[in-house]
Amino acid sequence: MGNGIAHTFAQHGFGVSLVDINTEALNKAIQTITNNLDRQLKKGLIDDQVKATTLSRIKTFTDLQQGAAHADLVIEAATENREIKLKLFKQLSDIGSDQVILASNTSSISITQIAAVTKNPGNVIGMHFMNPVPVMKLVEVIRGYATTDAVTNTIMELAKTLDKDPVEVNDYPGFVANRILMPMINEAIYTLYEGVAGVAEIDTVMKLGMAHPMGPLQLADFIGLDVCVAILKVLYDGFGNQKYAPCPLLVNMVTAGHSGVKTGSGFYKYTPGSKELIVADKFVSR
Ligand SMILES: NC(=O)c1ccc[n+]([C@@H]2O[C@H](COP(=O)([O-])OP(=O)(O)OC[C@H]3O[C@@H](n4cnc5c(N)ncnc54)[C@H](O)[C@@H]3O)[C@@H](O)[C@H]2O)c1
């Protein structure tokens, strides 16, 4: 997600410092941005000049202090882990001026809780981009309990300058996107678990019947089944309602290391370079 956010800002004229603790991740990010710019070039969406200037606006850093020292806005897109994010925001709060806006791309962690570890909670906001960032129009802008009107307005206007369509929502578990999406994915997995239908059948019903571009099981593989479990747990803990408990089949798949595209298998099997959708072979029904 970090490379997509950096790509989008740089393409729209902003200087970007891309920070990661892992040098390999930074090299991979620049490679991914280059590949994605090449794709835009091939489609005639940009020219060589835009590709070159976009890349020239992105600098990489492994040191947070160096990368964030002169920023007007920091967008955190680190691993979806509460401890990592709280530690990062505590550090960010000590870097730069009191005016810096600190945003998180978190899919589910409370913005209010993140803001509470900083010196200026009013300047903390959620800026939830969708994957792939350069393509998807939505930015879910999440107001924490303390987020000021001024900061919210700045981020809403900024998202528009990136050619995105921002939507303002309040900070409750799952915000809007994942509060609605994750129960649907979980229900699709329950439908499989209870033997109502197979993987391809469930996805076909939702694609052809509801005009979804991708079935919920394939979408879960793309998001990452481990991420789905983590978000469902946030909903379950936040609302205390059994309806959000992750399906046992989903939990088993993650425990067995079948977390979707990133692990090579989930509800489907993934071979690098192949676009064919092959259903993975083993699903244990109730
Ligand atoms: N993947 C998606 O489809 C998606 C969609 C919307 C939002 N998000 C959110 O975006 C964030 C990132 O997701 P992702 O899928 O890109 O994760 P990822 O695990 O692929 O990448 C996270 C990166 O953060 C780096 N990192 C970890 N700790 C760090 C630290 N302390 N300082 C700097 N870098 C650190 C890691 O090295 C890694 O390169 C998460 O909060 C996730 O919930 C993801």
Image: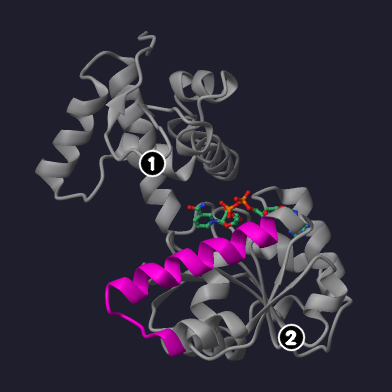
Q: Is mark 2 within 8 Å of ligand 1?
A: no
Mark drawn on residue 96: none
Residue at horizontal 42 percent and vertical 85 percent from the top? 48
- Range of magenta residues: 25-49
Secondary structure that dominates the magenta span: helix
Q: Tell me if residue 225 comes above or below residue 14 in the rendering.
A: above
Callout 1: SS = loop
Amino acid beneath label 2: Ala
Q: Quadrant of residue 280?
A: top left
Disc 2 from disc 1: Cα separation: 38 Å
Of 55 and 106, nearer the camera is: 55
Q: x, y (%) of residue 216?
A: 31, 39
Mark 2 vs 1, N-terminal side = 2
In the rendered image, the quadrant that contains the C terminus is: top left
Residue at horizontal 56 percent and vertical 62 percent from the top? 31
In the rendered image, the quadrant that contains the N terminus is: bottom right
Q: Which residue is mark 2?
A: 71
Instruction: Give the image quadrant in which the ligand numbered 1 is located.
Output: bottom right
Q: Quadrant of residue 168?
A: bottom left
- Tell how many labels: 2
Magenta span contains residue 32: yes
Of 32 and 219, nearer the camera is: 32
Residue 134 in sight: no
Callout 2: SS = loop
Amino acid beneath label 1: Gly
Residue at horizontal 52 percent and vertical 61 percent from the top? 32
Dot 2 and dot 1 residues touching (CB under 8 Å): no
Mark drawn on residue 273: 1
Q: Tell me if residue 77 comes above or below residue 223 in the rendering.
A: below
